[in-house]
Image (cartoon, coloured by chain):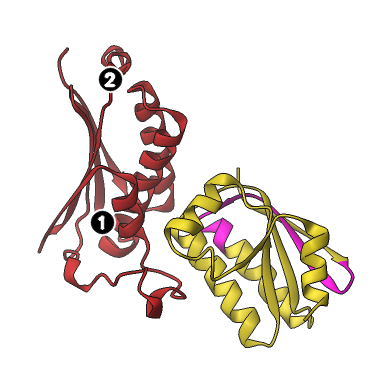
């Protein structure tokens, strides 16, 4: 299953609902383009909902890191929501779990943006 | 039980990466590994295939990637060879080092080593061979592969 994204706005935060695989090629490109598009529109509070992402490879991990640093470098904020166990474990072994701000509840995540 | 071996010679394309991953999933499942182990084996194979296609052969249409699966009594062994200029293992940075954590690449070999029991990398001037080994635990259903 290839990667798909859809976006919605809640309380000034752009929630990107992702599904499928974030892997080398199409999946990584779609994520990159989505983040670039949001930043170009000035939408810098981004919550990546990965609840339906069942697979990420090292390229996909790199794309998440790239998204995180790109948003941060533009004065924005990117958080991750609803990690599946596979993605959670991958971020743990690569020591990225503590780098990203990971949430498992959408309401709490939105409040975390508002608190800044 | 006799050993079983199957090999594929593939183009240097992203389709090869997907194909190697899917074949690894099937063979690992047939060998009796559980779902979690199958995922890890398939991901290790995917990462090795990415290295071969992207870094080894650099998508060169004249260069091939050879993927070989071998099931022995003790192990599932997957060997992936490219026709690049040879991977310099000493130049692979530690992706867990604080200064590398936010790098966008360089985690493939680390993930392979994390997911497999043994990893042997043999670079040469005519390409890199990486051997991924997963030990078979118990009396797995590896004989299924014999009927293929």
- In the image, residue B109 lies at what x, y percent? 30, 58
Part of the protein shown in magenta: A10-28
- Compared to B133, does A4 lie above or below? below
Along the line of sight, which residue is nearer the eye, A62 or B65?
A: A62
Along the line of sight, which residue is nearer the eye, B51 or B60?
A: B51
- In the image, residue B140 lies at what x, y percent? 31, 18
Judged from the image, the secondary structure of the residue bearing numbered disc 1 is: loop
- Compared to B121, does B16 lie above or below? above
- Compared to B130, does A109 lie above or below? below
Disc 2: which chain?
B
Chain letter, colour red in render: B
Residue carrying label 1: B62
Q: Can residue B88 be seen at all in this image of the molecule?
A: no
Residue carrying label 2: B138
In what quadrant of the picture does the C terminus of chain B appear?
top left
Numbered-mark total: 2
């Amino acid at each position: 299953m290839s990667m798909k994204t859809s976006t919605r706005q809640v309380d000034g935060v752009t929630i990107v609902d992702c599904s499928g695989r974030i892997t080398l090629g199409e999946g990584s490109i779609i994520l990159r383009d989505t983040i670039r598009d949001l930043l170009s529109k000035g939408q810098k509070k981004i919550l990546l909902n990965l609840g339906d992402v069942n697979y990420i490879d090292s390229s996909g991990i790199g794309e998440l890191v790239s998204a995180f640093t790109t948003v941060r470098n533009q004065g924005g904020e990117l958080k991750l929501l609803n990690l599946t166990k596979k993605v959670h474990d991958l971020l743990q072994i690569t020591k990225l779990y503590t780098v990203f701000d990971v949430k498992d509840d959408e309401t709490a995540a939105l409040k975390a943006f508002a608190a800044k | 039980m006799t050993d079983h071996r199957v090999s594929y010679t593939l183009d240097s394309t992203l389709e090869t990466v997907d194909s190697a991953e899917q074949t690894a999933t099937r063979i690992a499942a047939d060998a009796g590994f559980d779902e979690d182990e199958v995922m890890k084996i398939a991901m290790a194979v995917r990462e090795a295939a990415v290295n071969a296609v992207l870094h080894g052969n650099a998508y060169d249409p004249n260069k091939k990637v050879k993927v070989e699966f071998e099931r022995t009594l003790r192990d599932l062994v997957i060997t992936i060879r490219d026709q690049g200029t040879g991977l310099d293992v000493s130049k692979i940075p530690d992706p867990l080092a604080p200064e590398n954590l936010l790098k966008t690449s360089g985690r493939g070999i680390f993930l392979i080593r994390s997911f497999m029991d043994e990893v042997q990398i043999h670079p040469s001037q005519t390409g890199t061979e990486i051997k991924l080994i997963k030990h078979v635990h118990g009396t797995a259903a590896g004989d299924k592969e014999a009927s293929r």
